[in-house]
Amino acid sequence: MRKTEEKSVIILAAGCGSRLKSSLPKVFHKIGGLSLLDHVVRAASEISPEKIVTVLNPKYENFISVINENIVKAFQPVPKGSADTVKCAMDKLSSSDSGWVYVLYGDIPLITAKSLDAMYDVAVSNENTAVVVLAFDAGKDQNLGKLEIGEKYGTIKRIVEAKDLIESDKVVPLCNAGLLVRRDVLNNLLYKIDPSGATGEFYITEIVRLAYQSGFDCRYYVSSKEELSGANTRAELATLERYFQDRMRRKILDNGVTLVAPETVFFSYDTEIEKDVSVHPYVVFGKNVKIKSGTEIGPFCVVEGAEVKSAQVGPFARLRPGSEIHDGAKIGNFVEIKNSVVHEKTKVNHLSYIGDSDLGKCTNIGAGTITCNYDGFKKYRTVIGEKVFIGSNSALVAPVKIENGAIVGAGSVITKNVSENSLAVARGLQKNVRNWAANFRVKHASSVCKPENGATMSNLTKEDEKKS
């Protein structure tokens, strides 16, 4: 058994992914709100490698990983195959001849650190091992390369690329999804790889055949097709999303969360939900969401960039980035909260928009209330104190402050600060004109039904006008 040795990771991500029919390279498409490439970076980061080198097309040199800011970038100007891609990364690694190098693919996003660790365990279990292949059973899929099993148990002779397969090849359905290569072997054999007779490309998978012919053992570790599937079409990308969501649902359920209808709830890669939370059907969690114990999320809610602490949300609510919902608060149906803090026991129950606002404790926001936070050029903040009552259908024009205990009358347009415990009413005075509606109908009798009381314009006397 070898002692723990230095590990480095090379991620191949220079392809264009033309089969997706997209101007965006395949590895930058997303599942669970995270690019395929960053999913691989995430798994690689969890094994604490000495260095992660990502090989990109030079057009995408501005790529910044949201998972690991310390990744090193290398570039492949002209695509010549996976072995050439690895060559582009070699000068970014240390000059050491010891340790191990993972060669991973940027379009296999569901790969796990558990499998990477298992590959290493296989590698160091035998002194003569030079290569470990991460494999999965692809069944009858003809578009993937296959492994040829060696004479010695648990070893392989080579990997045959799909374009090079012929009927006489003695291969098994196991397919390559990544390599772990001893550093001295990689240094020695990488530049001895010849181009494929079928495509003229240099394949990194040839390292297995060369190592085997040099007297080394090449072994494999098998994981599931769900974990190691890639995406070359939009349909396959949708399948990866389904696999990812199923994985997240299992994780969330195992953490003690109630999902009433798990198959209808969608998560981001970084969704955090504590135990004893209830999530009803048809809820979508975007990036950067934290839900604390005791929260209930009603049906048909969208939550993104928000933190909810033991509150009630929904149904049909939307929480946008920067929102904080505190203990005992209620965010009801058809309410949108954006970049706002809703403090303890405050209610925004119906048909409201609260943007760029601070709502104090035990405040009630009436139906139809909006905070007018944008003047077409800049955003402004609304501050509402504790135990404030905002009447229905009110518009609060920011910047404005409504202090503790104040009441705003329904239908008000508030443009000035409201002092503590004051009543603010800002609406036009109501005027009732008697018989006006009846006379209006008579005037337009040709297009509407006549009034039942037979009222005419002459009914509206000067005395009636005076009374009105």
Image (spheres, rainbow, N blue to C red):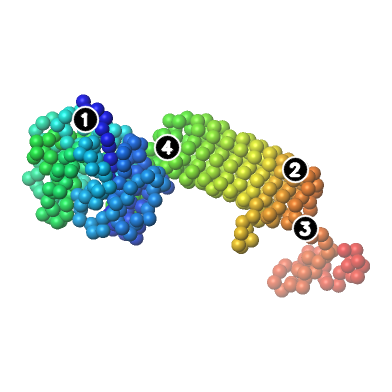
Left or right, residue 326 beside residue 147: right
Image quadrant occupied by the C terminus: bottom right
Which of the 4 quarters of the picture holds residue 135? top left
Instruction: Check disc 1 and report its element: helix, strand or loop.
Output: loop
At numbered mark 4, what does the secondary structure look like: helix, strand or loop? helix
> Along the line of sight, which residue is nearer the eye, 18 or 391?
18
Left/right of residue 69 with respect to residue 230 in the rendered view: right
Residue 243 image position (x, y, % from top left): 35, 42
Q: Where is residue 218 in the image (x, y as percent from the top left)?
A: 15, 36
User: Along the horizontal axis of the image, is 363 left or right of 466?
Assistant: left
Residue type at mark 2 is Asn
Residue highlighted by disc 2? 404
Q: Nearer the viewer, residue 362 or 68?
A: 68
Residue 256: x, y in percent?
47, 30
Q: Which badge, 4 or 2, is on the more N-terminal residue? A: 4
Label at residue 124: 1
Residue located 10% across and 31% down the image: 152
- Specify which label sits upstream in the sequence, 3 or 4: 4
The x and y percentages for residue 447 are: 70, 72
Which amino acid type corresponds to the residue marked 4 in the rendered image?
Arg
Give the numbered dot on residue 249: 4
Q: Residues within 10 Å of mark 4 (few under 14, many from 20)?
A: some
Sequence-wise, which precedes: disc 3 or disc 1? 1
Mark 4 vs mark 2, foreground winner is: 2
Lower position in the chain sequence, tag 4 or tag 1: 1
Query: Marks 3 and 4: CB-CB under 8 Å?
Result: no
Residue sitting at x 80%, y 47%? 422
**Circle 3 residue:** 427
Q: Which of marks 3 and 2 is nearer the N terminus?
A: 2
Secondary element at image label 3: loop
